């Protein structure tokens, strides 16, 4: 069974809700998922290299990703994630830059095998938001099977 690590940071809870729905989608497709807030993540206890997929999420706040995600990306740059499956996501109010920046770092710096695009949502509680996040998780899980 493929193993995935979903790490997120949140300000208002929307990115947490997205992470939960993404994890649901991955689990429904047979992946074993570890879901952690970055504040609870310890690289010595949870080794990212032991996972087949890594999915990172952060909200956009004043046009930027939050500091905990920046710090995590700097930490992850010190280990080899090349070729691992990856995804990026985040909630936003106005502009939504964070998921694109996370995605770009994972693809171009870490050289991960990314799903086709980052997931950006204002909320999972309106419209098709929850289903869209679940489908993103399914998409990642399907990429693990390739």
Image (spheres, rainbow, N blue to C red):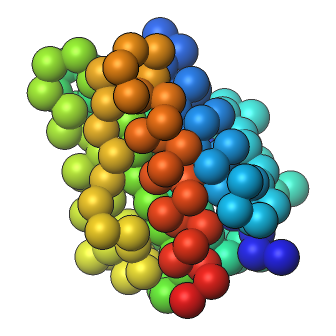
**In this picture, is 1 found above or below 16?**
below
Residue 79, can we see it?
Answer: no
Expressed as whole percent of the image width and height from the top left, the position of residue 21 reads 60, 36
Of the pair 127 and 19, the residue shown nearer to us: 127
**In which quadrant of the rendered view does residue 114 lie?**
bottom left
**Residue 51 image point, x, y percent:** 72, 72
In the image, taking residue 67 as reference, residue 3 lies left or right, namely right
Q: Is residue 100 visible?
A: yes
Q: Which residue is situated farthest in the top direction here? A: 12
Look at the image and tell me in which quarter the N terminus lies.
bottom right
125 or 107: nearer the eye? 125
**How far across and down, in percent of the image, does residue 131 sit?**
48, 36
Residue drawn at point x = 55 percent, y = 89 percent: 146
* Left or right of residue 126, residue 54 in this image: right
- Residue 28 on image: x %, y %: 72, 54
Q: Is residue 114 left or right of residue 120?
A: right
The residue positioned 49% from the left and 63% from the top of the image is 139
Q: Residue at x 69, y 62 (%)?
A: 29
Question: How many numbered dots are placed on residues in this image?
Answer: 0
Residue at x 45% of width, y 23% of height:
124
For residue 17, which quarter of the picture?
Answer: top right
Q: Nearer the viewer, residue 58 or 45?
A: 58
Q: Is residue 85 above or below residue 58?
A: below
């Amino acid at each position: 069974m493929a193993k995935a690590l979903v790490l997120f940071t949140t300000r208002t809870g929307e990115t947490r809700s997205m992470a939960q729905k993404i994890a649901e989608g991955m689990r429904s497709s047979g992946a074993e998922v570890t879901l952690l807030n970055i504040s609870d993540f310890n690289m010595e206890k949870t080794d990212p290299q032991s996972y087949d997929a890594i999915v990172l999420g952060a909200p956009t706040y004043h046009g930027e990703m939050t500091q905990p995600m920046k710090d995590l990306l700097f930490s992850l740059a010190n280990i080899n994630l090349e070729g691992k499956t990856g995804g990026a996501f985040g909630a936003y109010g106005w502009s939504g830059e964070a998921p694109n920046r996370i995605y770009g770092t994972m693809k171009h710096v870490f050289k991960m095998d990314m799903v086709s695009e980052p997931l950006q949502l204002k909320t999972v509680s309106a419209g098709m938001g929850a289903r869209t996040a679940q489908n993103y998780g399914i998409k990642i899980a399907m990429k693990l099977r390739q």
